[in-house]
Image (cartoon, rainbow, N blue to C red):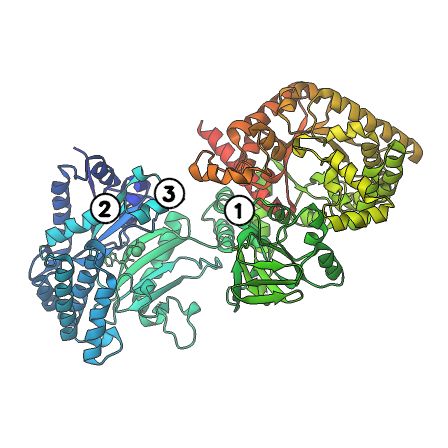
Amino acid sequence: MTKWVYNFGAGVNDGHAGLRNLLGGKGANLAEMASIDLPVPPGFTITTEVCTSYYDNDKKYPADLRGQVDAALARIETAVGRKFGDKDKPLLVSVRSGARVSMPGMMDTVLNLGLNDSTVQGLAAGSGDARFAWDSYRRFIQMYGSVVLGVDHHRFEEIIESVKLDADVIEDTALTPEDWQRVVEGYKQMVAEETGKPFPQDPVDQLWGAIGAVFGSWMNPRANTYRRLHDIPASWGTAVNVQAMVFGNMGDDCATGVCFTRDPSTGLNEFYGEYLVNAQGEDVVAGIRTPRPLSKAYAKPGEVSMEEALPQAYAELNKVRDVLEKHYKDMQDIEFTVQQNKLYMLQTRAGKRSAAASLRIAVEMANEGLIDRDTAIMRVNPASLDQLLHPTLDPKAEKKRFAKGLPASPGAASGAVVFSADEAELRAHKGESVILVRIETSPEDIHGMHAARGILTTRGGMTSHAAVVARGMGRPCVAGAGGINVDYGAQTLSADGVLLRAGDILTIDGATGEVFAGAVKMIEPKLSGEFGTLMGWADAARRLKVRANAETPLDAETARKFGAEGIGLCRTEHMFFDPQRIGAMRQMIMAKDEAGRRAALAKLLPFQRDDFRALFKIMEGLPVTIRLLDPPLHEFLPHGEAELAEVAHALGMNEAAIKARAEELSETNPMLGHRGCRLGISYPEIYEMQARAIFEAAIEVGKTAAAPVPEIMIPLVGTKRELDITRAQIEAVAKDVFAEAGTSIEYSIGTMIELPRAVLIADLIAENADFFSFGTNDLTQTVFGLSRDDAGKFLPHYVEQGILTKDPFVSIDVDGVGAMVRIGAEKGRATKPGLKLGICGEHGGDPASIAFCEAVKLDYVSCSPYRVPVARLAAAQAAIEGAQANSTD
Ligand code: ADP
Ligand code: MG
Ligand code: MG
């Protein structure tokens, strides 16, 4: 015989916390609390298997369910000394839904079930409190009527209002027993009219009606939508809990409340919660009366805390708090009721908490000895750290919302509106805070994006240029705010009839996508305290090294501040977009022959050398991986007509010649075109200049500070010969520079692995490479055979339809791209066992991708500076999980 019903409370606990799948979270924890002798009103749980069976069998219950429910109900009757439907001592119960995970959209709880025209008299007589009895009955009809019978809740409120009007009172609590009785009469009449049937009087009918409503709600549209959004399978089913009522509405020595064992927003180890005297169930959250703080510590002047109002019950609750934390070893979210000074526990679960609270609670619990350090590390969601590393809007600050876009890059920023990158840079140099507002951004805007405090675009999605670059730089960004109209000519932006001009102050919240007119007060991030402690523990636990993608001194400094152990990707092309350099770059591109190119490159050399010198100094001997020029040359050419004319003038060339050259360089698929080492092979002088800049800078820095160890990286290698040729060029430059300087430095030369062919011949490539860095952005494009720039037309749809489980540019596609990385790593190490292996690109900061990197035993991951702490924590979690998996094998 299948056991469909599990008892809890009053000495019989069939279940425990480990049976969450069968009993739902609420039922499992009620049994667990009862089994550790906490005061839980007795009850029973109808298992989730009943729900599954109900839907598998044409909405029919298992045949033996009824008998099991009857027996469990009889047990409650004996335990509390009351009988279901008894006119003198009626048993009342609550009927509560509860799935494995808490799920909005499910049926609301029905309280006081078992009341009818006769039992209400018994309740009144037995308690000596007619007001309480009629109040409970009207609550029952109201809940049952709306939740089970589907009557609009407004209809109930109208009736209360009219009785209150007649009685000339404002507060519900001022109504007399007779008033409540009138409410009940009104309710019953209204329900009969609405449903065409009298309100059910038989408690057994009431019970099965409520049970059926819980199971029915499992498949209602709200629940279905929620499940779809949160990947919860319909096959899980919900459980139903039936539990003896306790009453928080029997007078001033009664109360009901919800609380957290620690402050869920700050993590402070203080009892945090709210309660209401003389109230029941959802009153606390319903907003009809204003709940009061639980503990004195949180009471404002004039507010009476539960600690003061009900000291005895509070002391008991405080003990329970301690017991629960020690038992569950985590912060708990508790629901309770006090009936005539006696405390009853009605629910406990792990409490939801803010990122800051999660960090503080994990560290403090480890320090208290409640959990070990590994557990503390596992408790904090790495992705949530992002919120802590940026300034955030003060939740208490007043703000005027202007528009809303996509939360493209976290953090908040305020500043004066500017509409161009040059203007952003100009005003930032003068020390002003600016927000760069663009319809969309392009690579030429990078200097302005860097100078700005934040970026706002009206077009583009989460992977638009603005979003990707802003995340990389750690600049807050709101992208795709389509409700805003930008007029570059008039220098204005407007939304919903509100107009802002250049220079007006604007605030963006990159964590929510909200945009506000005017300045909003901010809270600065703190990197010390619990953050520092947890990071220290994570560093001790992880195997993977964490580096940063950085090319500017500011990025490098940020990276070090956040604990980067080197630079894993310095994209040298970003150094050419600066207005001072782009001219020489364009001159190089326009040059007709090698001599012309060399002349232009000679102008770029000092700039590059300065850049590298600055980076090497900041990194103080840590490894710095420098990628030689990668993008196709036409990316550096002017776009609009006006700019074209300007460039022609600056270079002393005619516009037609520039246009012709631009056309010559333009490609159908630039991503698969003349780029990476293909450029280095066509124009060896470019890589030679870059190599010279690297070596000269390294020698210079090495004279006075820790000697840098540059790792020179060749992009887009697909054949071994490409690496052989470019490597030989670089080594020749090294020889020259060392001879000129009369000294030498250590360096290494490696390659990006970002083409499937490179993966397949990784054993050959490794013969001439000192390291591999998997460029998983390009590898994803080339493995999937798609271009990121064009993927916006179908990729979101693919993810929505479940054709792909995740955006492969955000989280590595383990099956395909991951297999490539695995093969590349194995082949590379087969040739050179000690070959250093890393990964760079957006994946390097994604926790799931980092877990993969740990599984294939790469040496390091490299990510944007602001993701470094995320990666450190994710790497530690991956190492801990890996160790746990091995020990249970
Ligand atoms: P939810 O899942 O929405 O929190 P619950 O089933 O926890 O719904 O019920 C909500 C509230 O109803 C509880 O917090 C508690 O105050 C009250 N409640 C539920 N069962 C009982 C009971 N047996 N006695 C008294 N109050 C109850
Ligand atoms: Mg609810
Ligand atoms: Mg609850």
* Relative image position of residue 187 (x, y in whole percent): 16, 65
Mark 1 crowdedness (10 Å alpha carbons): few <14, some 14-19, many ≥20: some
- Secondary element at tag 3: helix
- Secondary element at tag 2: helix
Disc 1 versus disc 3: nearer the observer: 3
The front one of 369 and 198 is 198
- How far is disc 3 from disc 2 in space, using C-alphas? 17 Å
Callout 1: CB less than 8 Å from ligand 1:
no
Res 525 → quadrant: bottom right
Q: Which residue bears the numbered disc 3?
A: 228
Rendering quadrant holding ligand 1: bottom left
Q: Is residue 153 visible?
A: yes
Q: In the image, what residue type sits under mark 1?
A: Ala
**416 in relation to 228, above or below:** below
Q: Which residue bears the numbered disc 1?
A: 383
Callout 2: CB less than 8 Å from ligand 2:
no
Q: Residue furthest bottom?
A: 168
Q: In the image, what residue type sits under mark 2?
A: Gly
Res 198 → quadrant: bottom left
- How far is disc 2 from disc 1 in space, using C-alphas? 36 Å
Which part of the image, by quadrant, shows the C terminus? Answer: top left
* Relative image position of residue 536 (x, y in whole percent): 60, 46
In the image, taking residue 804 as reference, residue 446 lies left or right, namely: right
- How far is disc 1 from disc 3 in space, using C-alphas? 22 Å
Please report the residue visible at 84 percent of the width from the left and 49 percent of the height from the top: 649
Callout 1 touching callout 3 (CB < 8 Å): no
Q: Which residue bears the numbered disc 2?
A: 216
Please report the residue visible at 16 percent of the width from the left and 60 percent of the height from the top: 194
**777 in relation to 426, above or below:** above
Q: Is residue 628 visible?
A: no
**In terms of sequence position, does the residue under pointer 2 or pointer 1 come before the other?**
2
Mark 3 crowdedness (10 Å alpha carbons): few <14, some 14-19, many ≥20: few
